[in-house]
Amino acid sequence: MAPDSTAPAPATDGVDLHALCADAGVFELLDGLDRELIGLAPVKARIRDIAALLAVDRARTTLGLETRPPSLHMCFTGNPGTGKTTVALKMAAILHKLGYVRKGHLVAVTRDDLVGQYIGHTAPKTREVLKKAMGGVLFIDEAYYLYRPENERDYGQEAIEILLQVMENQRDDLVVILAGYKDRMDTFFGSNPGMSSRIAHHIDFPDYTADELAAIANLMVADMHYRLAPDAQEVLRDYIVKRMARPNFANARSIRNALDRARLRQANRLFAGTGATVTRNALETITAADLLASRVFTESDADGDDRPRA
Amino acid sequence: MRITQGTFSFLPDLTDAEIAAQIQYAIDQGWACSVEYTDDPHPRNTYWEMYGLPMFGLKDAAGVMLELNACRKAFPSHYIKINAFDSTRGIESIRLSFLVNRPAEEPGFGLVRQEAAGRNVRYTTTGYAAQRPAGKRY
């Protein structure tokens, strides 16, 4: 946290932590998190911890106590579709509200954006990205691709070194969040112990349960300004259970794809239907039939890819 | 002789915090900052060396300060300036430019008078430091 020049003069008696948080809008932020993110209990718990730490730090600064900014570099591990990117986006906003980062923007990159094509290309490229992320959050998706042990002349190592240096020296200028699948990130950290030790928060994203996925689906439907017909709710639940058993299940991402395909079928149904006029109600309702047409219900043997049904 | 070029040059040298605040102002205006250095600060020398490319798309001054500090490390006794370029159509020009680093000792400029045809006199200024070969000037 940058020392706040407008902070009141050091008091001697004490500060009201809750008033401090309420002033910064921290409580609304955490409540919003609870509302918009289904499940993810360990993630929310960690965000609460961080919020508390930053509030305490702020209180300490108010009382004139020496406070070193905490290291907030994070690593998100979890299966596909568990909300790593979504949380990273929110994290940027949260850290901004809490006054830890100055701008609160998120720069999302992958290996391609950091690692160059030839000798001498990597360093400027990585620095460019780091400069753009200053004052905000740098989100490196599938970070384990940065390190390729099979090729010892791979330029990824150079990017990692520059990253480490900035992560260490400019902790108050940017927050780095790495994301990836659990097992591969573990291998990555195994071969880059320096990286692992500079990341204070290793957060594991659990898979969603069927109930959580149903709640997520309802949120998504509302977000797309559709609604489910009453009998579609049960079908949806049924669909989720069946879909979870299939290979290549990608949690919320699979649900989003399923809803997109349901929209296609709904559009097709309306288009093929008799009569030239459609009611507002028909336009915004996804019926049980739209969901039931999914291959998940019709095929018993699962070959498991996510392609839409022809 | 203390060289006065660009904005703020009649003020005492800016501190790093002040430089960062100016850069932040430029970024907030949507201007792209760049770092340039030279060992030939003649007023007519508009072609300073670029240290890296102009930095478009930055949100925070820390990125420019990172580059500035790298430049200071590489050229501790050169003149270094920050330029802020406004890419708005119709302007497309430098909006703000100020010195952020200068050598400890600045020998200044000498005035040379050349007697030309008739009783004409032509004047020219040359930096004392610029008379030495590049790299040995400051």
Image: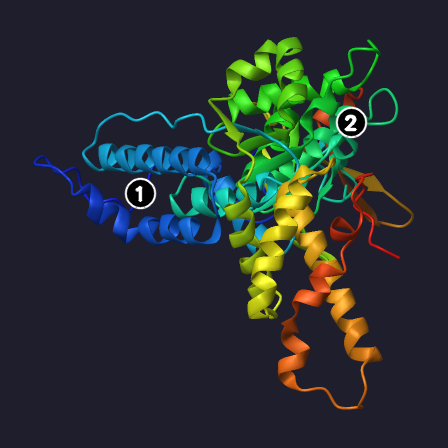
Label 1 element class? loop
Look at mark 2 in the image and give the residue it sits on.
A115
Which percent across, then down, holds residue A6? 28, 47
Q: Earlier in the sequence, mark 2 or mark 1?
A: 1
Which percent across, then down, holds residue A17? 20, 41
Label 2 element class? loop
Q: For this view, does A132 lie left or right of residue A118?
A: left
The residue that appears at 49% across and 42% down in the rendered structure is A91
- Are discs 2 and 1 both within one chain? yes
Look at mark 1 in the image and give the residue it sits on.
A5
The subunit carrying tag 2 is A
Q: Name the amino acid, label 1.
A: Ser
The subunit carrying tag 1 is A
Quarter of the rendering occupied by the N terminus of chain B? top right
Specify the quadrant of the image occupied by residue B36: top right
The residue that appears at 92% across and 48% down in the rendered structure is B117
The residue that appears at 83% across and 40% down in the rendered structure is B114
